Amino acid sequence: MTVDASSWPPDARRAAALGRLFRRIGRAVALAGVCLPLVLIGISKFTQSEIEGVEPLLTGTPWLAWLPALLGAAGASYLLGVVEVATAVLFLAGLRWPLAGVAAGAFGAATFAVTVSILLAQPIWDTESGGFPWLNSLGQFIIKDVALLGISLVVLGEGLLRTGAERRGP
């Protein structure tokens, strides 16, 4: 829906223009904020140090322990890496194709929901600092995924809206 702002006072028109500018910038930063960790952490899943680092997280989380049991530590890490990099590609493709945005939002939401769920199974409080609310390094690493989960859900919703708009036509 477009609003005719030509009758608005100059200050209101300037504020609206700034609002649109910051929304565009914010969307670009949010997209980079999702894609960069997905790609950089995703490609690291193919390294020995990441394979060794992710294995205790998976085996220590009851609902994820089946992954290394079924695929081995390396296979589980590789699978996660492929999903993360593919999800980043879908986020970028979603800029042009709404269905890619739907897939990106769904895969991103699933990825980050699973990652955030690790907060429920692993020790995340820094006991040396007195526990809650002081996060240890694992908690600090994972807590940011709450925001990435939110961005993924927004992309999913916007993709669904764009897909529906395309089907309705002009």
Image: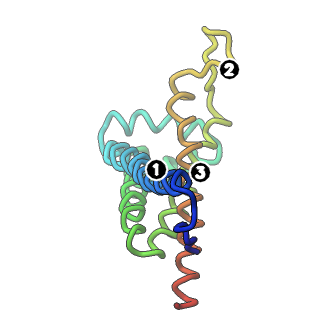
Q: Nearer the viewer, residue 67 or 101?
A: 101
- Which residue is identified by label 3? 150
The answer for how far apart the CA atoms under marks 3 and 1 are is 19 Å
Quick check: 44 left or right of 72? left
Residue located at (63% from left, 26% from top): 123
- Which residue is identified by label 2? 133
- Which residue is identified by label 1? 22
Residue located at (37% from left, 62% from top): 92
Q: Nearer the viewer, residue 144 or 7?
A: 7
Q: Nearer the viewer, residue 168 or 89?
A: 168
Question: Which label lies toward us, 3 or 1?
Answer: 1
Q: Earlier in the sequence, mark 3 or mark 2?
A: 2
Question: Which label lies toward us, 3 or 2?
Answer: 3
Given the image, on which type of amino acid does mark 3 rest? Answer: Gly
Provide residue 50's location: percent of width, then percent of height: 37, 37
Q: Earlier in the sequence, mark 3 or mark 1?
A: 1
Residue 128, relative to residue 17: is it above or below? Answer: above
Residue 75 visible in the shown view: no
Q: Nearer the viewer, residue 44 or 153?
A: 153
Provide residue 73's location: percent of width, then percent of height: 42, 44
Colouring convention used in this rendered image of the protein: rainbow
Q: Under tag 3, what secondary structure? A: helix
Mark 3 Cα-neighbour bin, 10 Å: few <14, some 14–19, many ≥20 = some
Mark 1 Cα-neighbour bin, 10 Å: few <14, some 14–19, many ≥20 = few
The answer for how far apart the CA atoms under marks 3 and 2 are is 22 Å
Residue 120, relative to residue 165: is it above or below? Answer: above
Looking at the figure, which quarter contains the N terminus? bottom right
Residue 70, relative to residue 134: is it above or below? Answer: below
Q: Under tag 2, what secondary structure? A: loop
Mark 2 Cα-neighbour bin, 10 Å: few <14, some 14–19, many ≥20 = few
Provide residue 113's location: percent of width, then percent of height: 60, 50
Name of the residue lying farthest toward the bottom: 169
